[in-house]
Amino acid sequence: MKIAYLPALLFACVFAALSPAQSVTLTIDPETVGAEIDNKIYGQFLEHIYHSVNGGLWGELIWNRSFEQNELGQWTVAGDQIAQESMGTNVRLTFGDENWQDYEYTLEATKTAGQEGFLILFRVKNEQDFYWCNLGGWGNTRHAIERGNKDRGRWGVVGPYNQGKIDSNKWYKIKVRCEGPKFNIWLGDDKVIEFTDGQDAHLTGCVGIGTWATQAEFRNLKVKSLDGKILYEGLPDNLARRNTAKLWQPYGPAEIYLDRTDPLNARVSQRIVTGPQGGGLTQQELCIRAGETYEGSVWLKGDAPKGMFVRLTGDDQRQTEKAIKPPSSDWKEYRFSLKPKWSSDNASITVAANADGRVWIDQVSLMPKSWRKNGGFRPDLLKAIADLKPPVIRWPGGCFASSYQWKDGIGPQHKRLPHPREIWDDLDVYSFGTDEFVAMCRAVGAEPLIVVNIGSKAWNTDAETHDYTRDILDWIEYCNGPADSKWGKVRAQNGRPKPYNVKFWEIDNETWHTPAPQYAEEVLRLAPLMKKADPSIKLLACGSGGMGRNGANGMPYNRTVIEKCADVLDYISIHHYENPDRFADGPRNYEAFFKDLAGIIKSSKNPNLKIYVSEWNAQSTDWRTGLYCAGILNAFERSSDTLAMAGPALFLRHVSATAWDNAFINFDNRTCFPAPNYVVMKLWNEHYAPLRLELTGDPGPLNCVATKSKDGKILYYKAVNPTPDAIDVVLNVGPPFKIRNAKMQIVTSDSLRARNTIDQPNLIHPVPAKAEKGATSVSYKMPPYSAAVLSIN
């Protein structure tokens, strides 16, 4: 517990001790059954971001195995201009002095391609504490200041939104003025933003430039103090091109180059030029365990007459090494096996020449043999997924899906190509593709749900030249076609002759950059083609991205898609992320949104259309998000007449991630821990029952629901107390049900800011609680800020 929370907590405890507990009396009617609850509301969503898969669930220990994650193609200099040539998201370049206080930052910028505008960074302390002015953000519709704060998780908008866009191939003059907590932004001669940050503003920091799914050029960068002194002018002095791929370091005195000439696959390889002392590349932060066999390979070509080696080195400098014979002039795979007698939480792997050489390296791979025998998955993360018992898992995204090239993610690993863009700290190498995803689903007992890329111009630079419709239909055939079909034959060649029979197919993700009528026309074009490819599949289309009753991505988007497409769809897919401080009223408000959406569905051409909440969460990993999770799951169960499927995000997240601290499963290279939302969802799903029962009486502040097992022998009552006061509850059970026994489990915490961590993975967990059984009732006390499940047999 942080000291900052003690005064409030002590006051709350004293107040609770002095104040009488509230009381609530409710009655469960075991005979009045509502709409059946679909277990798929306890689904999950796996997206390839923040090393959830690449460096996480998939058991490959090497990060950036093919060296594609690097600074080639991002920031380059041409004369007096800086060009950002990639289409990645969250691409930043910062420079200057983090101790600068008040200043004016001026520059010129032009957009050369992409869907948005510019990120102009100021008052930057580090990757997590900063401001940026997002000019032409949100699909090139608005300007706003966003603030990053490591204590609050992901960055978010502060101050006003202003309508506006950035045109391509037009130079804009931009000025940012910082004076204490006051910020003014000019675009040309127009002041587009004026904002004072009254929430403990960042008062010092350097500056920067950036883009989001956009290519741009910048020039005439200048920073001066408010008294006119020049602090910085010209090109950033840290722009020298790096010659080593990200996450790799040089080993020894070798000269290292990123080489675009004849890589094994994709775009680059690493070229190493060594002298008599040899040298090569090394990567750190590997978790190595004594007695485990590590199987690996590396692709090499070139000249190293005295041979090469691959070596594991522990943090105590103990080593295990394997010799590699001299490479030839053509690319060739060199396999190796290492079995260290030591353990290390921070070991390194080195691939190097023994002496003089000129060698190219690509596709470095290392995996524990026991993991490979288990399907290639990291065991603790696979178990964490299996323990949640997800009935359905959505994949591969998310934004990741909107540019996913599925054909590059099947077949031999060394032939797979990386994702077209770096996104959310990650450039995925497609080591975990369709076959691995379906195998993982089968291993944990989940139905796979695939999100297809429809070829949006916002996410695909080749949208006008590549046939993405053909890709969708081929993907369906690869998954569901017989082994003698064109793509079924490819699946069989990849070792899976039996069809996967993937039932659920979603038509892209978060398509709000496309007007709803235009997206609806695309759905109407694709749906009959997809159904023709496999008539048994279920189709899902994108809906809203929040609870807005107006606006481009709110209820009007749902209405348009449903009115035009309901009769060709099975589900409407909606998203919503909540402020964790709204753990009490957030679930209730979203439930009201479900009811309004259900009304639109009821009057549509397909009143049986179901709601799928395909992304939801509160943006935190402290106890607030546990309370929100319990409340929203209860809302899902109460909305069972229309809401049939759901899945939160994020699912898995490496602790090195720079944003989106809301994941259910959090991990480093050694171990993992569950966030409170995981703890609650696991408890709720373990007590799932399909028959929703009538619950009468005034629940007061409680958020609660009652259900019954299919055989009628067990009643479940799930409740959330989102208040700082204890509540006495009497739960009456109507006839003919006879109470034999009652058991209760509670999750709570003495601080809303408490959380599980790598070092304290079980700080927040369910504990048994006392429930007093009467002849026809059960009574118990619900602590402040708690979530509880009562089982009545």
Image (cartoon, grey):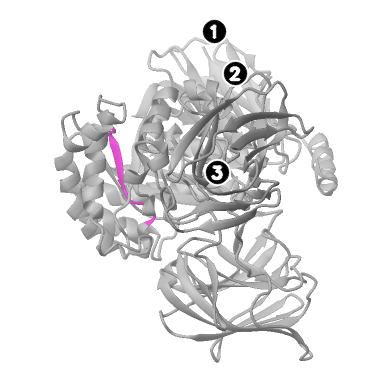
Between disc 3 and disc 2, the foreground one is 3
Q: Is residue 14 left or right of residue 304?
A: right
Specify start and end residues of the magenta stretch as a single range: 501-510
Residue with the mark numbered 1? 740
Residue topped by disc 3: 51
If you read the primary sequence from the N terminus, does the residue marked by circle 3 or circle 1 appear first?
A: 3
> Which amino acid lies under the numbered mark 3 shown in the image of this protein?
His
**Residue visible at 59% across and 45% down in the picture:** 662
The rendered magenta stretch, by its main secondary structure, is classed as: loop
Q: Is residue 337 magenta?
A: no
Give me the C-alpha separation between circle 1 and circle 2: 11 Å
Which circle's residue, 1 or 2, is located before the other in the chain? 1
Q: Residue at x 55, y 44 (%)?
A: 51
507 inside magenta stretch: yes
- Where does residue 652 sit, x and y in percent of width and height? 55, 39
Q: Which residue is mark 2?
A: 778
